[in-house]
Amino acid sequence: MKARGYGQYCGFARALEVIGERWSMLVIRDLLVGPKRFTDLHRGLPGIPTNILTSRLKELEEAGIVRRRALARPERAIVYELTEYGAELEDIVIGLGRWGAKQLGDPRPDEVVTIDSMITAFRTTFQPNAAKGIHTSFELRMGDVVLHIKVDDGRIEVGAGPLADAQLKIEAGPAIKALLNREMTAVEAIKSGAVGLTGNKKLLGTFVDLFKIDPMPITKSDARAG
Amino acid sequence: MKARGYGQYCGFARALEVIGERWSMLVIRDLLVGPKRFTDLHRGLPGIPTNILTSRLKELEEAGIVRRRALARPERAIVYELTEYGAELEDIVIGLGRWGAKQLGDPRPDEVVTIDSMITAFRTTFQPNAAKGIHTSFELRMGDVVLHIKVDDGRIEVGAGPLADAQLKIEAGPAIKALLNREMTAVEAIKSGAVGLTGNKKLLGTFVDLFKIDPMPITKSDARAG
DNA sequence: CTGGATCCCTCACGATACTG
DNA sequence: CAGTATCGTGAGGGATCCAG
């Protein structure tokens, strides 16, 4: 259970020793959405072996990042949740997600979309400035992943599951990414049928304004010093 | 050279696939300080095998994070530097370093201090608000690591090497951490001889104000719901 | 059914030596 | 200086099994 160290007395290196192991930060990403049981985590992390998940949870617990809590009687179960210290990683996860989204191409054949990754994605790409004075709500469906978004004057709440009285319900596939990174406009998406809408269709423009994936910066060509 | 994936179509997962491998983020940390040659990187990453460093650099280059550049003639050599996209990780590295520093205990027996990790550490712990209107400069020596800091009204520049006309020169061991996390006051440090000073000794108080490691948050005891 | 523990196999990593 | 080559080890992957 010994975390391999980097041999450096350095806060950054220490951080990597604790959360830099494979899968660790994905566990944290999912726990940032909310407390979860072992099985929920296992479902949300496609391909992680149970022994690895056990190891990671134990390491994170020993490092004071995750707390293991036994639920009360009706449904006696064990949930894992972030400690205060673990929850401080939220900005890091958001920032890394925003950075990584810029290089998102098309989904690879074997890649899936999980509910927690989508919730994180919308928190990540949210543009608070564009939400000033906006009060509305959305429901999104991508395959069998369903989530809802409530916008409340510069703040949002993103959660799992449907929202019956959402002002606009959006059903989309990969087109959702094309909207967020401005490869496709709201009008084009509607005309092409890439997204299906129910409710106040004009709100799709608002939706697009609220979430954005920034473009990859231009890598200046090599300064081939002669 | 295939990076193992996580099987999720998610910006955050994609980020981890590219920079989540062992050693990758430490390479980035050192390159954030400035372009470096292979040998410099190797020296700054104690224990990394050369083939692993080669692999990491190649992966980072293919991902558009690092650029390999051949220097001009006088000293024909190859340097590695961050692309614009790679440099965008600065805030992430700073944030993770700040987070990890909170759990820094005493140095382990085999841990070393490198120049780039120290430069990053001071950038990480810098408190811009405390530097308003301050104009001064420091030189720090910890063992054979020497760096300098110039403070210029809310901004700093941290660099490697000595600074002849620094207003205060500080020589210290692990006491430097005790100062940053407020385990020790400037007065105590001077009286106990934990730090050696040359120059305007009163500036040690200013120095302590400028850099800070925040405390670990209190983990609230289990809410043992009955 | 949840919440893991145990097994085996593979490949990435680590140490060392060597080359253009 | 800037890497390649070789080889051993141990963490990760995958399946199965077990206790409450």
Image (spheres, coloured by chain):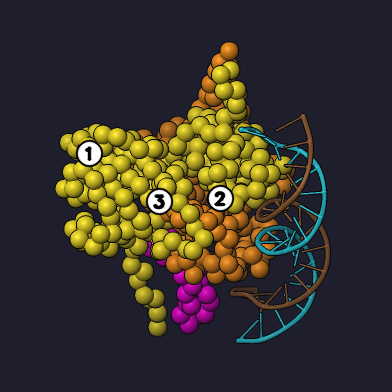
Chain colours: A orange, B yellow, C brown, D cyan
The residue beneath circle 1 is B167
Kindly identify which numbered label has been placed on residue B46: 2
Check residue A17 for magenta coloring: no
Query: x, y (%) of residue B206?
Result: 20, 46
Distance from disc 1 to disc 3, alpha carbons, whole Å, reads 20 Å
Q: Locate the N terminus of chain A by quadrant.
A: bottom right
Query: x, y (%) of residue B175?
Result: 32, 58
Mark 3 lies on a secondary structure that is loop
> Would residue B183 be seen by someone viewing this image from the given angle?
yes
Query: x, y (%) of residue A142?
Result: 59, 46
Mark 1 lies on a secondary structure that is loop
Task: Report the number of discs.
Answer: 3
Callout 1 and callout 3 share a chain: yes
* Residue A203 higher or lower than A185, as above or below: below
Q: Residue at x 57, y 63 (%)?
A: A3
Is residue B71 rendered to the left or right of residue B157?
right
Magenta region, residue range: A66-90
